């Protein structure tokens, strides 16, 4: 030790070192000193950590930076003064000290170097027992998803001390990622020790396989790879593939087993076991790559045939495909009962590719031995209920060919199973299987779409101020506040304030106090929660920012304006006026569960205003008029005039009739920053006057003269269909805004649809938000007539990326059908137009339409598909057209439809692909006989 190391180090000196901010200064001073001589520093260091963490949360940027810059030096002081591995672990893993930046002497900061941390732990006065225990404790601490920096320290301590650390999830993930770095010429910790002169040189590994061969506990770690979550995602490193098979985990593990360093049979069983247990698709993909790399031979497959059958029947799609392929390679040697079990199980799955391949395997087995039909045909008829008509047809023809080879009892069971075939194949089944012909016409037990029961009832208003406060709290906390509950609570707050202001203030006081303590109280000004917070402030006598928020909402640039902010505007209006221009109640509160207001009730409310000497609030009365039926507005205006109220001009928004079509080959307008975005094919309504704003400056800025005055102006301005940003989530309407948009103008669904269309169209994009589309089911209840924009909205909903949003579109379709508001031919024309632009994906819309047909909307689905077929007939080679024809045939047969469809003559011609010709001919036959 140096003379300085023998000196007693005072707390003042250490505090000055920490305040100086530089970790190396602390290391140089405290590193040579045994921890026992630093015991007097431990309590002050812990206290200082508490003080600095408190400074980080003070909300002052200057104090935050001053405290943050000291954390790295503080951490080293704590580590070097720790008496036990437990104390050292506390300093290494303290949440606020993890990976803090290291200030630089010349200014700025750098990322922490954890090799320096490791070196600080290896000071000579620390013994091997200390290092072994700390390595074990740190390995146990590692989070399950891994922590590369702490893993480096734990691994370095283990290599240094010879500790046998536990194979925790976090440690195994770190080990796995360490191996994955070898193809980057990574130098592992033993080489670093040698570079530092701490240990003798060790061999360098230039590949993953070479590194695995040298691992002392390889068997233990490989077994844990099949137990630790998300290992498979590490197997699929796309960069490793460019460095050869010796650097890819699946092939390296296979090679390891081939060299006898790990038992191959055990590796196969571990892989199959994980695939059978199932996991996330991304994780399974890595183990499927391992299964492929293992390339099981026939004997290995047969020894595990039952596991492969179970995997093909119950496994994830990719795993089932791999298992089916493996079993197909030993088809000739597979026991008959196992092949029958495999066939029945796979054909019960919905995947078309699996079913096609399985029926091919059955046919191959029957060609070898027709007598096997006795066991295989009862399994093959499982495909009669498959959702894909093409699979049903393939199974029907296969069964018909080999039916003579089974006993009469089996033949009778096969014929009975034919009832499960779709209606379009029943005619073929009667011919091929010699079935008795049923009576003509649609089945009497065909489902009928349920009668529309009307919208839900509005919630009962709160009985007193306390209940109003409780329900306000619930609305503000709700992830998706119900429009009916919001309107009821909003109305109650205004009414209770007029009735007894003091009682309402007392009831709301606890909620206002909680909001003051909420660190997230300043939310986006467009949100209902933030607006209600301003109203809460106004009702409890506090200052609020509603004036500023209103100006901001109305002054947004044109390309991000939206009438979806109407609820927030109305709330801010109440917050601004409730004390200076009080009213007895709101005019715009709906009287029905579809967001509408009875005109007579609105007249009664205006009469009460006149008697109370109150004047309507502008946004409130504008919203009320938008909720009154157009045919009742004249009477309302006449009555209002007699009461002395001058209502605003006709708020009826435009109903667009013309549309902009953005083809894939048409460039987008230049954006506000001078860049031209990539073309996004779409169809969207044009403003009624046909004007299109495409100038970048006009998109980016707003003229003061063009600032809208309120809800009505926002609704009147149909979104510009050439604005690319609107269709990729700008402005991004929240689920709450979309849900409430339907109630903005329930008698004018075309205008509402025009404003909601960009958000619904965005859900066809893979980056669309999760969760069901909240607009469509509520929109379907609108009392106004659905025109072309509403049907375009539904068409976009049907092609959404996520299944839950397509289910919302199905609800819309069924509700509109039950109400007699759906025009199927218009929907079909829009679907065909979007299909032509490659916006519609048939594999998304056809299952939804099939569900609608099974739910009783068969005639509507048929009419929709007939329009699609008519529009698509000029492109007979369009992908999935045969599937459209097949579903149309199902609907026509089920509903007993007899008509002509001229487009079928074109599609049955020689220019069409074979399956299109077959399906077109079948549909034509169903329609005409």
Image (cartoon, helix red, strand yellow):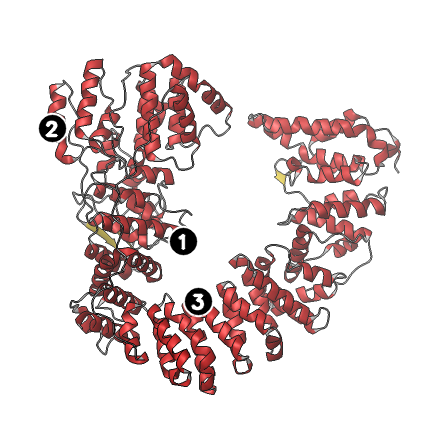
Nearest to the eye among marks 2 and 3: give it: 3
> x%, y% of residue 15?
74, 27
Callouts 2 and 3 close, C-beta under 8 Å: no
Q: What residue is disc 1 on?
A: 766
Q: What residue is disc 3 on?
A: 348
In the image, residue 131 sits, relative to residue 329, either above or below, namely above
The foreground one among 632 and 618 is 632
> For this view, does 98 lie left or right of residue 383?
right
In the image, residue 54 sits, relative to residue 697, either above or below, namely above
Nearest to the eye among marks 2 and 1: give it: 2
The foreground one among 675 and 119 is 119
> x%, y% of residue 770?
42, 47
Callout 2: 10 Å neighbours few (<14), some, many (20+)?
Answer: some
> For this view, does 623 lie left or right of residue 493?
left
Check disc 3 and report its element: helix, strand or loop: loop
> For this view, does 397 lie left or right of residue 280?
left
State the CA–CA distance, disc 2 to disc 3: 62 Å
Seen at 55% across and 61% down, the residue is: 284
State the CA–CA distance, disc 2 to disc 1: 49 Å
Q: What residue is disc 2 on?
A: 635
The foreground one among 734 and 850 is 850
Check disc 1 and report its element: helix, strand or loop: loop
Callout 3: 10 Å neighbours few (<14), some, many (20+)?
Answer: many
Residue 572's disc is none
Seen at 59% across and 79% down, the residue is: 298
Check disc 2 and report its element: helix, strand or loop: helix
Nearest to the eye among marks 1 and 3: give it: 3
- Quarter-of-image position of residue 646: top left
> x%, y% of residue 552?
34, 29
- Quarter-of-image position of residue 719: top left
Callouts 2 and 1 close, C-beta under 8 Å: no
């Amino acid at each position: 030790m140096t003379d300085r190391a023998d000196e007693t180090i005072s707390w003042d000196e250490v505090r000055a070192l920490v305040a100086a901010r530089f970790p190396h200064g602390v290391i140089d001073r405290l590193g040579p000193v045994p921890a026992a001589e630093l015991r007097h520093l431990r309590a002050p260091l812990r206290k200082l950590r508490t003080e600095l963490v408190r400074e980080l949360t003070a909300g002052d940027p200057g104090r935050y930076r001053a405290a943050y810059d000291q954390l790295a030096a503080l951490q080293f002081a704590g580590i070097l003064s720790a008496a036990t591995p437990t104390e050292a672990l506390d300093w290494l893993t303290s949440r606020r000290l993890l990976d803090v930046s290291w200030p630089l002497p010349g200014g700025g900061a750098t990322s922490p170097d954890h090799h320096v941390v490791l070196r600080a732990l290896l000071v000579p006065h620390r013994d091997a027992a200390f290092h072994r225990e700390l390595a074990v404790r740190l390995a146990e601490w590692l989070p399950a998803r891994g922590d590369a920096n702490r893993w480096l320290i734990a691994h370095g301590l283990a290599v240094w001390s010879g500790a046998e650390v536990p194979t925790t999830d976090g440690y195994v993930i770190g080990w796995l990622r360490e191996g994955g770095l070898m193809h980057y010429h990574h130098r592992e910790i033993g080489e670093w020790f040698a570079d530092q002169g701490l240990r003798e040189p060790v061999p360098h590994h230039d590949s993953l396989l070479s590194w695995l061969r040298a691992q002392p506990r390889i068997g233990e770690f490989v077994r844990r790879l099949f137990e630790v979550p998300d290992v498979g995602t590490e197997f699929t490193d796309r960069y490793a593939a460019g460095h050869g098979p010796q650097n890819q985990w699946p092939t390296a593990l296979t090679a390891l087993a081939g060299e006898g360093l790990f038992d191959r049979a055990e590796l196969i069983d571990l892989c199959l076991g994980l695939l059978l247990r199932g996991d996330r698709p991304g994780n399974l993909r890595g183990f499927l790559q391992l299964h492929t790399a293992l390339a099981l031979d026939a004997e290995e497959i047969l020894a595990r045939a039952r596991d492969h059958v179970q995997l093909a029947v119950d496994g994830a799609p990719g795993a089932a495909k791999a298992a089916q392929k493996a079993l197909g390679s030993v088809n000739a040697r597979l026991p008959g009962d196992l092949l029958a079990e495999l066939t029945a199980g796979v054909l019960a799955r919905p995947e078309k590719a699996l079913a096609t391949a399985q029926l091919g395997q059955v046919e191959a087995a029957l060609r070898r031995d027709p007598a096997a039909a006795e066991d295989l045909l009862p399994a093959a008829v499982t495909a009669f209920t498959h959702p894909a008509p093409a699979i049903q047809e393939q199974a029907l023809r296969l069964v018909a060919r080999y039916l003579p080879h089974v006993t009469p009892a089996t033949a009778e069971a096969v014929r009975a199973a034919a009832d499960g075939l779709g209606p379009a194949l029943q005619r073929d089944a009667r011919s091929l299987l010699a079935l008795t012909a049923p009576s003509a016409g649609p089945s009497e037990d065909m489902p009928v779409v349920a009668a529309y029961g009307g919208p839900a009832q509005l919630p009962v208003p709160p009985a007193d101020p306390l209940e109003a406060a409780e329900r306000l709290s619930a609305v503000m906390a709700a992830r998706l506040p119900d429009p009916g509950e919001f309107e009821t609570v909003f109305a109650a707050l205004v009414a209770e304030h007029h009735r007894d202001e003091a009682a309402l203030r007392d009831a709301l006081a606890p909620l206002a106090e909680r909001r003051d303590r909420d660190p997230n109280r300043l939310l986006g000004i467009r949100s209902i929660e933030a607006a209600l917070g301003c109203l809460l402030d106004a009702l409890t006598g506090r200052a609020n920012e509603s004036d500023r928020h209103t100006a901001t909402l109305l002054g947004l640039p044109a390309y991000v304006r939206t009438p979806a902010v109407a609820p927030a505007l109305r709330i801010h209006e109440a917050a601004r006026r409730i004390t200076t221009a009080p009213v007895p109640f709101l005019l715009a509160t709906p009287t029905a569960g579809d967001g509408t207001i009875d005109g007579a009730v609105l007249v009664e409310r205006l009469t009460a205003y006149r008697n109370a000497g109150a004047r309507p609030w502008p946004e409130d009365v504008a919203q009320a008029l938008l909720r009154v039926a157009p045919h009742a507005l004249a009477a309302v205006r006449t009555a209002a005039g007699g009461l002395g109220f001058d209502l605003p001009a006709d708020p009826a928004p435009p109903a667009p009739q013309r549309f902009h079509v953005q083809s894939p080959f048409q460039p987008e307008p230049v954006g506000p920053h001078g860049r031209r975005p990539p073309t996004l094919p779409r169809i969207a309504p044009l403003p009624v006057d046909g004007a299109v704003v495409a100038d970048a400056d006009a998109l980016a800025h707003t003229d003061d003269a063009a600032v809208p005055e309120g809800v009505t102006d926002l609704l009147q301005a149909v979104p510009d269909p050439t604005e690319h940003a609107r269709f990729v989530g700008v402005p991004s309407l929240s689920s709450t805004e979309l849900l409430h948009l339907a109630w903005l103008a329930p008698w004018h669904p075309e205008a509402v649809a025009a404003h909601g269309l960009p958000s619904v169209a965005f859900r066809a994009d893979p980056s669309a938000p999760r969760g069901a589309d909240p607009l469509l089911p509520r929109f379907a209840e609108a009392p106004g007539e659905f025109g072309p924009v509403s049907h375009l909205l539904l068409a976009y909903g049907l092609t959404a990326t996520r299944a839950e949003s397509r289910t919302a579109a199905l609800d819309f379709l069924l509700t509109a059908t039950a109400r007699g508001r759906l025009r199927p031919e218009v929907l079909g024309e829009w679907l065909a137009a979007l299909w032509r632009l490659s916006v519609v994906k048939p594999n998304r819309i056809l299952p939804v339409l099939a569900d609608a047909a099974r739910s009783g909307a068969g005639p509507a689905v048929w009419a929709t598909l007939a329009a699609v077929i008519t529009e698509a007939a000029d492109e007979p080679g369009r992908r999935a057209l045969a599937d459209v024809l097949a579903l149309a045939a199902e609907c026509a047969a089920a509903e007993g439809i007899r008509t002509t469809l001229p487009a079928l003559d074109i599609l049955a011609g020689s220019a069409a692909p074979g399956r299109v010709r077959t399906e077109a001919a079948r549909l034509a036959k169903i329609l005409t006989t």
